[in-house]
Every structure is written in structure tokens, then in C-alpha cells.
Image (cartoon, rainbow, N blue to C red):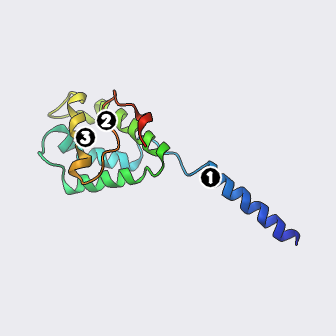
Amino acid sequence: MAKVAYLAVVLVVVVARMLVEPGEALTCGAPEEQRTGAVCNVYTRGDQPEPSGECCNAYRALRATAKTRAERRQLCSCVQEATSQSRYNRGATANPAARIPRFDSLSEKCGLPSLFSADPEFDCKTVN
């Protein structure tokens, strides 16, 4: 009987932790973000009129990593940070602000609903 009670307490603690800590935090610079930046760079730079299938697949995979509201808000912040950094701004469009509309168009062009904007003026705290 004591073992059953102990297992019940352990189960309650585990379930409670899952409710408090829904998963690992999304981190900027994760492999999915780097891959999306690399394969979509040609499009966001303005060298290609449409994103490639590989770009859309990478973008979908990136978006799929953000399952909770907190993770989507973090992804928004990461994207804003990445589009403003010079490491993604080499090539035809050196001005980071010129890339924002192209990045923002990825959702529509890849058949996904828009979640947020890469524009640093957009408040990521409003993302649902």
C-alpha cells in the first residue's frame, strides 16, 4: 500500500511540473533558425522573386518549434534579432530594414498564417 501511495505522489509531482514547465525554452540561434536563415537568405536578400521550396520547408520547421505562446513570442524576438544582425545582411540588400518585408512575406508565400513581424517596432509580447 505504501508503494502505491508513493507512486501516486510521484505522479502528481510529475504532472504538476509538466503544467508549470511546458518544455524547453526556445533559444535564439538554434539549428532550425540558422538553417532557415541560410536557405531563405537568397529570397530575403532580394536575389530571388519567390522563396524556394527548401526555404518554405525550413521556415515551416522553424515555426513548428514554437508550440506555446511563450515560445512563439521568443521566436518573434529571435527573428527580429537575426534580421537586424549583419551576419544575415551580406549581399544585394545590405540594409536590414529592406529585408523585413521580404521576411514578413514568408508566412503568406509558404502558406502559413502570419504570427508576427520581423520589424523591431512590432511588439512580440502581443503574439498569441
> Which comes sooner in the sequence, label 2 or label 1?
1
Q: Residue at x 41, y 35 (%)?
A: 124
Q: What's the mark number on residue 72?
A: none
Disc 2 and disc 1: Cα gap in Å?
30 Å
Q: Quadrant of residue 75?
A: top left
Mark 1: amino acid: Leu
Q: Where residue 37 sits: x, y (%)?
A: 29, 44
Q: Residue at x 17, y 35 (%)?
A: 91
Q: Where residue 72 sits: x, y (%)?
A: 43, 44
Mark 3: amino acid: Phe
* Labels 2 and 3 touching (C-beta < 8 A): yes
Local SS, label 3: helix
Please name which of the two marks, 3 or 1, marks the residue nearer to the observer. Answer: 1
Tag 1 residue: 19
In the picture, the quarter occupied by the N terminus is: bottom right
Q: Dot 1: within a 10 Å radius of its alpha carbon, few (fewer than 14), some, or many (20 or more) residues? A: few
Residue farthest to the right? 2
Q: Dot 2: within a 10 Å radius of its alpha carbon, few (fewer than 14), some, or many (20 or more) residues? A: many
Local SS, label 1: helix
In the picture, the quarter occupied by the C terminus is: top left
Residue farthest to the bottom? 1
Local SS, label 2: loop
Q: Where residue 12 sits: x, y (%)?
A: 73, 59
Tag 2 residue: 118
* Labels 2 and 1 touching (C-beta < 8 A): no
Tag 3 residue: 103
Disc 3 and disc 1: Cα gap in Å?
34 Å
